[in-house]
Amino acid sequence: MTHRTFTTRLRRPTAAAVPPRLEPVLLAVTAVALTAGGVAWLTGAGGLADLLWALGTFSAVVPAVAWVLVALRRGHAGVDLIAVLALGGTLAVGEYLAGALIALMLATGRTLETAAQRRASHDLRALLEHAPRSARRRTDAGVATVPSAEVAVGDLLVVGPGEVVPVDGRVESPAAVLDESVLTGESLQVERARDEPVRSGVVNAGGAFELRATATEQDSTYAGIVRLARQAGAESAPVVRLADRYAAWFLPLSLAVAGLAWLISGSAVRAVAVLVVATPCPLLLAAPVAIVSGLSRASRLGVVIRDGGALENLGRARTLVLDKTGTLTGGRPRVVDVIAAPDARPAEVLRLAASLDQYSPHVLARAIVDAARERGLALSVPSDVTEEPGRGATGTVDGHRIFIGRTNTADARPAWAGAVDNRALLDGAAVAWLTVDGHLTGAVLLRDPIRHDAPRTLRHLRTAGIERLLMLTGDRAAPAREVAAVLGLDEVRAELSPADKVAAVRAERERAVTVMVGDGVNDAPALAAADIGVAMGARGSTASSEAADIVLTTDRVARLADAVTIAQRARHIAVQSALGGMLLSLAAMAAAAAGLLPPAAGALLQEGIDVAVIVNALRALRVGQAARPALTPAAEALIHRFAAEHDDLQDVLESVRDAADRLSDSPGPEALAAVEETHRLLTERLLPHEYAEEHELYPALAPALGGPEATATMSRAHTEIERLSRRVATHVQLAHADGGLSPGQLDDLRSCLYGLNTVLRLHFTQEEENYFSLAP
């Protein structure tokens, strides 16, 4: 039996000669026939028992023949062919009990396999639901709503706030603010100026704008995505059942032994006995049991695997292709730094910006407000708030006229602002500038950060046998390369369209079994084109989830490593059970060929073999070697506590860097005040946090990580943080004694502060990656 992914089942139903729900009915019929025949035989009604067993055998023959015909039409003879020959042979020679036993085994195996392979419908419903069905066309008579299919090239359209752009076109208004994540996966909104192109499927994130159509609906970008998904799904390679792969050599061997036994002995019963014990029950039962067990184990961890074929294929994967935004990164911007002018403080800059942004729906505004609330800042209620799409918001906060957003790059800027522009360029970050009463006061840097669990996940995937890691993204090249460098990816390709992603996935499939991981509608065609598509379903689009073979229902990419580990373990156990069972069957075949096993006894012996291999296959339910260490509830609680403290301490890290910058700008009283404030924050907040980590968190993690030595390097970082903090404290004492900072202190103090900033940021990142990512 073969399996195709995504839209194959939309394009044409699976060819089958039997109803898809037949297996459970067949299982019930064969079980009842075998049991009723056994009762009749015990009561002395041998004739009735044979009749019931024969009926049970015959009930399995018809669907088994249909399954064999379906397999032959697809170009291979599966395990069911031996079962059909054995069933027919038992009926021919009157070994009805043996036939009923084989019928029950066949029905059980098919029922288990159907359960393992049943998948949710892979269709394009979500893609089609997002597609615009109407457009607002401006004419001399006004604005009229028309079906999007009627839009012609050259039509002038009006796109309202929150509406989906119906066709490809060019902006006719001064500017348009767009959410292009549906196409590129990039979470940051973009601004398109007059005459710049806009693709269909993107969402208007600002005010209404006019669009000049440059393509019809069918020739536009979004319609192309739907077509790509259909084509990619149709081209997905079939997944051959593990059982059928082994049957390729077991089938002719069984027939050869049965034929020789009949030829040499002249007894058809002996040939039937060989076929009875050759019935590949380890394949019919053990492999599906192991696969179903693996599916069950994965589901407990929030990994929904559509069918057994996907699990088998995942266990053979050697190439992993990943989207960036929402997969390797969080999928939404976060505040990474706050810079203040020389006469301001970073915490006050963030507080004022967040106070004004409380009423803005912009994705960057939400990130600024979230950061301020995480740090416990008291926000003021703004008044007279107005927002200009694509530029920013203006309002009154605490009696001051505040602006947050983009500033005119042509305006003269102070030196510190130029340094912010450079940092934003180097870090691939967006900048939200804050002005207070017309004066540039600070800046907030935002970007989509790498997931804390991504580095650990990719290391475990390499350990599990993934040989090639590739990132495909519609984002810009600079941030994409930075993410790839941090994660140690083998290759990165940026600024790709959905068609480019599909082409890249197809190329990778030529080399090895390929997994594609994504979370957006733009990823759906590539997910369908891969051997195994994995969707980040917790926040990902419905389209990507329906295009995928595997859906991660929790917003943790670490579950992907769990899925690979489970798939490899389940497949290994399935192969082990199948091969072990077949070796036992081969020994039984030899005995049957020699006349030592009659058909009924052979069927009972085969049942014993089945029990052994099924018990072994059920080991796939156990956890096995986990991708993450097992934590106690107390350790998990500590991880969540200290992770929250990391968020709360971001203003301390900003204060350290701000003090160092002020020493570079002007080493006067204001710089000393900044250093004193930093010293206070280090003493009152940071060092107690580090002490608690060392004496509470690390001892709780040590048993799961293999002992205290596992945290030794991080403990050394605590020592360095404390040493640099003491050095800063000594400089503050010297300054107080001398009435200010002396020139001889500046170089060392500046070095201490910049060094402390670097050590702290690296230490926080390492803890978040190595320790905090362990907790769900």
Image (cartoon, rainbow, N blue to C red):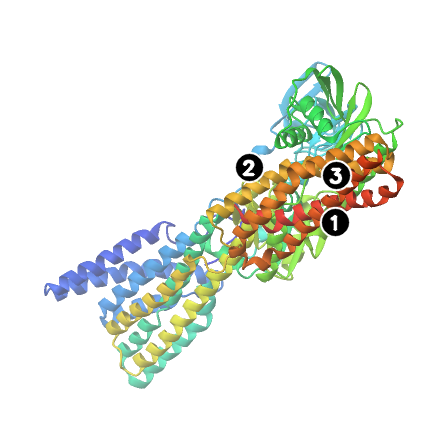
Quick one: label 1 or label 2, which is nearer the N terminus? 2
User: Do the CB atoms of the residues marked 3 and 2 lie less than 8 Å apart?
Assistant: no
Q: Which residue is mark 2?
A: 126
Point out residue 731 in the picture as x, y percentages from the top left corner. 79, 41
Disc 3 to disc 2, C-alpha distance: 48 Å
Q: Is disc 1 placed on a helix, strand or loop?
A: helix
Quick one: label 3 or label 1, which is nearer the N terminus? 1
State which mark lies toward you, 1 or 2. Answer: 1
Q: Residues within 10 Å of mark 3 (few under 14, many from 20)?
A: many
Q: How many marks?
A: 3
Residue 544 relative to residue 607: left or right: right
Relative to residue 470, is residue 441 depicted above or below? above
Q: Which kind of residue does numbered mark 3 sit on?
A: Val
Q: Which kind of residue does numbered mark 1 sit on?
A: Arg
Residue 89's quadrant in the figure? bottom left
Residue at 67% over, 38% down: 683
Point out residue 447 in the picture as x, y percentages from the top left corner. 71, 38
Q: Is disc 3 placed on a helix, strand or loop?
A: helix
Quick one: label 3 or label 2, which is nearer the N terminus? 2
Q: Which residue is mark 3?
A: 656
Residue 504 relative to residue 636: left or right: right
Q: Nearer the viewer, residue 73 or 374?
A: 374
